[in-house]
Image (cartoon, helix red, strand yellow):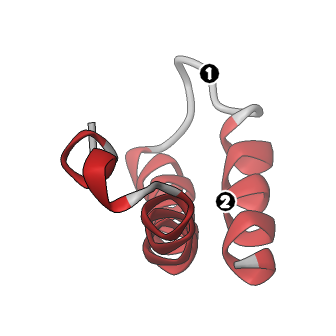
Amino acid sequence: MGTGLFTLAAGLFLLSFADASTLYGLYAGALLIMAAGMGLCMPALSVGVMAALPPARAGSGPG
């Protein structure tokens, strides 16, 4: 999960330099890095949230 959050932060850092003159390929690369970070950390975060809920509230966890 830490690797995913670090990767997401790196993508956001790169994206912070984007402006109207940024080439689309560079912009898409930063978004791809962000997507990879989200893909690495979101499953672990979802499991953590669902494990913390009591069984009676399991239906409201994903929302």
Which residue appears at 80% of the width and 45% of the height? 13
Q: Is label 2 or label 1 in front?
A: 2
Q: Choose between 36 and 49: the one closer to the eye.
A: 49
Which residue appears at 76% of the width and 82% of the height? 3
> Looking at the rendering, in which quadrant would you find the C terminus?
top left
Which residue appears at 74% of the width and 49% of the height? 14
Residue 15 lies, with reference to residue 14, above or below; the image says above
Position of 55 with respect to 6 (left or right) is left
Tag 2: amino acid: Leu
Q: Choose between 3 and 61: the one closer to the eye.
A: 61
Q: Position of residue 40 (x, y in %)?
A: 53, 80
Tag 1: amino acid: Asp
Say which mark, if any, is on residue 8.
Answer: 2
Residue 28 lies, with reference to residue 51, above or below; the image says above
Position of 59 with respect to 50 (left or right) is left
Q: Position of residue 16 (x, y in %)?
A: 74, 32
Position of 29 with respect to 24 (left or right) is right
> Looking at the rendering, in which quadrant would you find the N terminus?
bottom right
Give the crowd class for mark 2: few <14, some 14-19, many >=20 residues within 10 Å: many
- Number of numbered markers: 2
Name the quadrant containing residue 52: bottom right
Q: Position of residue 2 (x, y in %)?
A: 80, 77
Q: Position of residue 47 (x, y in %)?
A: 46, 73
Say which mark, if any, is on residue 19.
Answer: 1
